[in-house]
Amino acid sequence: KLYNNYPNPFNPATRISFDIPEEGTVKLEVFNILGETIDEIIYNNLKAGRYSYMFDASNFASGIYIYKITVNGFSDIKKMVLIK
């Protein structure tokens, strides 16, 4: 399960949390509104559990961003808003 980031809207950092029910390779990416990858937060093998990562958007412009998790054939996306 991919949770909504907190806080949202944010400036300049936000926390992205997710649960995985079984071990697998997790890829957590952030995209701009054009669908271009702007950051890869994690791409690693993780054990089952709850995880939380900070996304620092200090170098990015205000706007809407999308974050996506992919693990063991499952994927989900959420949106977040950066306000500077």
Image (spheres, helix red, strand yellow):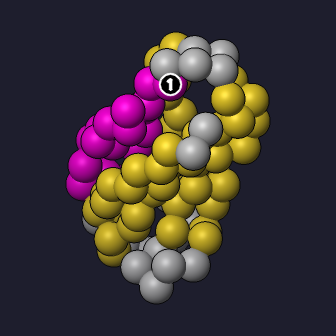
Is 15 left, or right, of 40 in this rendering? left
Rendered residue at 48%/49% (across/down): 75
**Is 60 placed above or below 54 here?**
below
Q: Which residues are magenta?
A: 1-20
**Is 71 placed above or below 63 here?**
above
Question: Is residue 55 visible in this depiction of the protein?
Answer: no
x%, y% of residue 19?
Answer: 44, 24
Nearer-the-camera pick, 49 or 6: 49
> Can you tell which quarter of the image residue 22 is in?
top right
Q: Is residue 13 magenta?
A: yes
Q: Residues within 10 Å of mark 1 (few under 14, many from 20)?
A: some
Question: Is residue 80 visible in this depiction of the protein?
Answer: yes
The amino acid sitting under disc 1 is: Ile
x%, y% of residue 69?
Answer: 51, 47
> Can you tell which quarter of the image residue 82 is in?
bottom left
Rendered residue at 64%/46% (across/down): 27
**Is 30 placed above or below 35 here?**
above
Is 26 left, or right, of 33 in this rendering? right
To which residue does mark 1 refer? 20
Rendered residue at 51%/68% (across/down): 31
The residue positioned farthest toward the right in the image shown: 44
The residue positioned farthest toward the front in the image shown: 73
Rendered residue at 61%/38% (across/down): 72
Q: How many marks?
A: 1
> Can you tell which quarter of the image residue 1 is in?
top left
User: Which quadrant is the C terminus positioned in?
Assistant: bottom left
**Is 75 placed above or below 57 here?**
above
x%, y% of residue 7?
Answer: 27, 41
